[in-house]
Image: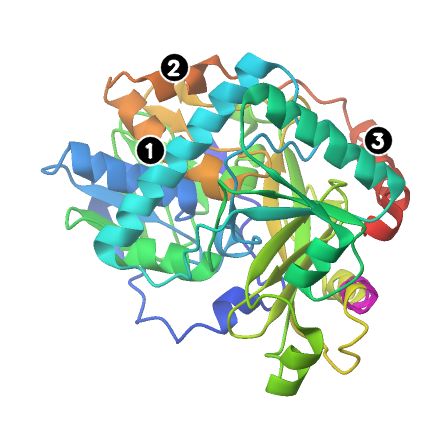
Amino acid sequence: MQLKCRFLPQNDGRCGWYEILPPPPVSTPLRGEVKADWVVLGAGLAGLAAARRLAELQPNAAIAIVDAKRVGFGAAGRNSGFMVDLPHDLNSHNYTGDQSADRKLIRLNRGAIAYMREIVQRHAIECDWRERGKLHGAVEARGLKALETFAKGLSVLGEPYRELSARDMQAITGTDFYRAGMHAPGAVTVQPAALVRGLGATLPANVRLYEESPVHKIDVGKPHTLVTNKGQLTSPRLVLANNAYAGQFSQLGFSGRLLPMYTYGSLTRPLSAQEQADLGGEESWGLIPADPMGTTVRRMRDGRICIRNVFTYNPCVSTSKSRLARVRSVHQRSFKRRFPMLPNVEMEYTWGGALCLTRNGGVPFGEIAPGVFSAVCQNGLGLTRGTIAGKLIAEYALGIESELLDIMLEQPKPAANPPEPFLGLGVRSTLAWKEWHAGKEL
């Protein structure tokens, strides 16, 4: 079986998280013929976790991980930097549903946080790791209702939270934009590109990382062969951790089941001392909107503010300069609504990032062909779900049982999508309606 890689990661804008880091060391692209016991495709959260866990469990095995770009440059370094522990469904306005399923998802997410915490602490990875929870903010009546539903669900689950008045929200964020809010203490925030780069730099000694090596073709067989411009990797076992880009592999059953989506972020320049004084509030916080289509906001210790909103359906898994320009205008407008006291602060960086959803929240986790293992599709929770999917796929492949693995295996498989053009029309019209309906939350 031969897989063609028609869609590869592109330079989708200038990701602020990546750009503000120091230049990375010189990369090691794949050259010549390389053999390994395991090969992992994709050096995002899932790929790095899979390679690390395989190396921990098989210290004498040769493990290779290959990525088209630099570590931290792709989708794993382009998100908002929340490691979310509670149920958080981007497809729904109902934050909590089935209690048993919710509790299992919480265990998965907290398992990811615990695994990542240990790595960050052991290797002293500098990624602004902060265990201060997350805010939820509401503006419209619909958002206030969503917060009420969220609070009721958390009460049923026995999870802690703190309700926040408009005055409380202003004391934290510096803006009077939000009518009410909530604080949930279990989430972790990070600088995502710094985290991913740190994970790549601290891989075990038996893992070889090949960057800037886009794979154009995969021959699935005994063994599997991944072909790049300047070399090829051969291995009897392959872990797919390329998330939205796996949707092009119709021979493996992905076609017609994954939804390659894009979301977009912008990062301001650092605020001056006077601007920070004009804003007030706390020096660092992260806020998720009550409405799933609303605006996520983070304030960083260095004075920068991150704005994230807008979702688009991008089956080609790339975006355009014109769309990025339109998104930047939306982000600037969202920023000015929230921070009118900062009239001269502009967006310094704007970028897009691919994520992968399914219509039913299902995941194609497990062995999908002989010696081919899937850890793709994180349904909008890349930091936590990518981490735990990568860790657990390694354990699954090696026959190591656990409660978390049982939970992962219980997750539904992806539902089939309608055919094009009906799928594209349906997704785009739904996104447009939800954005309009979000109102001031956007």
Q: Which residue is mark 2?
A: 406
Residue 332 in magenta stretch: yes
Task: Evaluate whether residue 1 shows in this view.
Answer: no
Q: Residues within 10 Å of mark 1 (few under 14, many from 20)?
A: many
In the rendered structure, which amino acid carries the disc numbered 2? Answer: Asp
Q: Quarter-wise, where is residue 40 in the image?
A: top left
Mark before the other along the chain sequence, 1 or 3: 1
Q: Which residue is mark 1?
A: 391
Q: Quarter-wise, where is residue 233 in the image?
A: top left
Q: Is residue 1 above or below residue 297?
A: above
Q: Mark 2–mark 1 contact, CB under 8 Å? A: no
Task: Evaluate whether residue 75 shows in this view.
Answer: yes
What is the x, y in percent for residue 315? 69, 41
Q: Which residues are magenta?
A: 329-337
Q: Which residue is mark 3?
A: 426
Cα–Cα span, label 2 and label 3: 34 Å
Q: Residues within 10 Å of mark 2 (few under 14, many from 20)?
A: few
What is the x, y in percent for residue 53? 25, 36
Q: Is residue 247 above or below residue 311?
A: above
